[in-house]
Amino acid sequence: VDIGSKSGMVYFSDATDIVSEQEGKTWDVLHGYLLDFMRSKRTGRLLRYDPVRNKVEVLASNIWFANGVAVNEEETFLMISETSMGRLLKFNLVGPDQGKLEIL
């Protein structure tokens, strides 16, 4: 999760569509990761929450276990960790490549 310093938008990732299993008072997120990895299905998403309008928007999908988001100070792009591929992705928020997801 990261919050844009200029807009106040909240950026976050949804790693997978697999629901984590609860064991007592804790959640086993590793179980979801392993199942996601074994089935080789990219269901992770990058999302943005607008607190003024109280709306969530999917910015990008088809990410293989999206696990971490950071927005740059100018709010021109986001960095996303794609854990199962062992790589970073860049999502452009403005400019000619707006909405484009790049592999770094």
Image (tube, grey):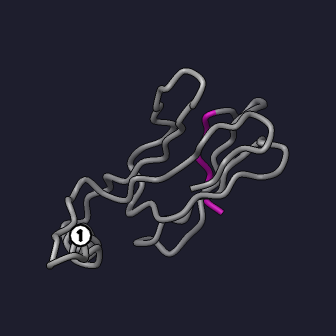
Side of 98 relative to 68 (left or right): right
Range of residues picked out in magenta: 99-104
Q: Position of residue 67 (x, y in %)?
A: 47, 65
The three-letter code of the residue at mark 1 reads Gly
Q: Quadrant of the N terminus?
A: bottom right
> Could you say which is closer to the camera, residue 25 or residue 5?
25
Residue farthest toward the front in the current orientation of the protein: 25
Which residue is at a point 41% across and 44% down the rendered structure image? 61
Q: Please give the name of the residue rendered at 78% of the width and 31% of the height, measured from the top-left corner.
A: 95
| Tally of marks | 1
Confirm whether the magenta stretch covers residue 34.
no
Q: Residue at x 70, y 52 (%)?
A: 71
Label 1: few (<14), some or many (≥20) within 10 Å?
some
Instruction: Name the residue carrying label 1.
Output: 32
Quarter holding residue 52 = top right
Between residue 62 and residue 9, name the one nearer to us: 9
SS for dot 1: helix
> Residue 104 occupies which quadrant of the picture?
bottom right
Question: What residue is drawn where x is 39% and y is 53%?
Answer: 14
- Residue 33 lies, with reference to residue 75, above or below; the image says below
Q: Is residue 65 left or right of residue 52?
A: left
- Residue 70, x across and y down, in percent: 66, 58
> How far across and how far down the image is residue 79, in percent?
65, 57
Residue 12 image position (x, y, % from top left)? 52, 50
